[in-house]
Image (cartoon, rainbow, N blue to C red):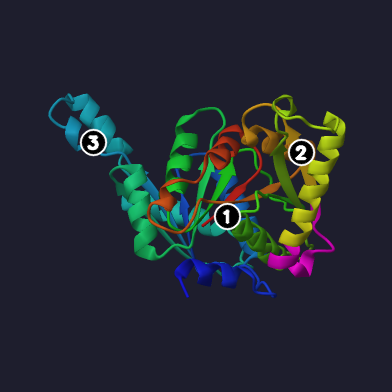
Amino acid sequence: MSTRSQDIAAMKKKVIPPFEVTQAMVALELSKTDEPVLAYFDFFARQIPVPAAYFLHVLPKFDLFDTVLDQDSQMAVGDYELNQEVIERMENKIKERLSKKNSIYVEFDVKEGDPLEELLKDAEDVGADLLVIGQKTETDYHGIMARNLVRRTPGNALVVPDQAQPTLRRMLIPIDFSDNSVRALQTAVAINKRLEEPAELICLNVYELPNLSVYKASKTPEQFKKMMEADRENAFRAFIDTYAPEVKDSVRTELVSRDLPGIGRYIYDFAEEEEVDFIVMGAKGHSKVELLFIGSVTEKVLALNDKMPVLIVK
């Protein structure tokens, strides 16, 4: 049996096990913008056991500027470099911020180098299966970092906007009936099994009506739309019955037709209207090449989003 066939067979297992995290890695900026990340990670880890968490901040390298900086500037850079006392103080702050109920083994480090490369390297070194990064809404920089990091990390990634609230009552799973959607749906079900109060699961499919003007159609646009929706609803039932039959009677399915480019915008608008507080989306795939592409729809949702944590499943 091919690897792909094995993956599909695994996806069709009738019982989905509860979601697990073995090693989390949390990217920090060592500023007040870390508070929403720490608050949400603490909340998340109280729902889903996280045995170990590694917190990392990366300082940009100053080596290239040593020869051109004057003495005052070099002193300023020296003041910015974090010493062991600061590292220990930050580690204590993290431990204090995390609930004692979590019993997480915590490590904290500050490194110097290219932030993206150092974060990716350390994520691989510690074997992180969940990478957590914040996303600031007042600037594009950290949002770009988040998308680049999510794109290149081999494990699941949780992006936490700075306006995120520690709550999980309504989960949205965008569905396009691909393998990516299967992973997202099953992950959402697995997470729900860990929650003290299960969240409402909403599966959303955004579809586009074809241009009827190029066809000799005997149906009116409204009749054709009803036919399309009936077909999608049948596909939804078959999809959920195949890959997550245990929630087929409880999951909510929604259809949204689009007449403008950009599926990501429709997903985000729906999430806002429905007051969704957590989104689960599938990345492109498992191969080394596919891991470089989280998908234009996912990237658009990340770019628009300022309040809903998004879990990218790989």
Q: Nearer the viewer, residue 111 or 295?
A: 295
* Label 3, label 2: how far apart the Cα atoms are: 50 Å
Of labels 1 and 2, earlier in sequence is 1
Q: Secondary structure at mark 1?
A: helix
Percent across and percent down for residue 154 are 43, 57
Residue with the mark numbered 1: 180
Q: Which mark is residue 62?
A: 3
The residue under the point 75% across, 35% down is 257
Q: Residue farthest to the left?
A: 67
Residue 16 placement: quadrant: bottom right
Percent across and percent down for residue 310 are 61, 47
**Can residue 20 be seen in this snapshot?**
no
Q: Nearer the viewer, residue 295 or 220?
A: 220
The residue under the point 83% across, 42% down is 227
Q: Nearer the viewer, mark 3 or mark 1?
A: 1
Of labels 3 and 2, earlier in sequence is 3
Q: Secondary structure at mark 3?
A: loop
- Residue 153 left/right relative to 283: left
The residue under the point 21% across, 31% down is 74
Q: Amino acid at mark 1?
A: Asn
Q: Which stretch did the figure color magenta?
A: 240-253
Q: Amino acid at mark 3?
A: Phe
Q: Residues within 10 Å of mark 2 (few under 14, many from 20)?
A: some
Residue with the mark numbered 2: 256
Q: Secondary structure at mark 2?
A: strand
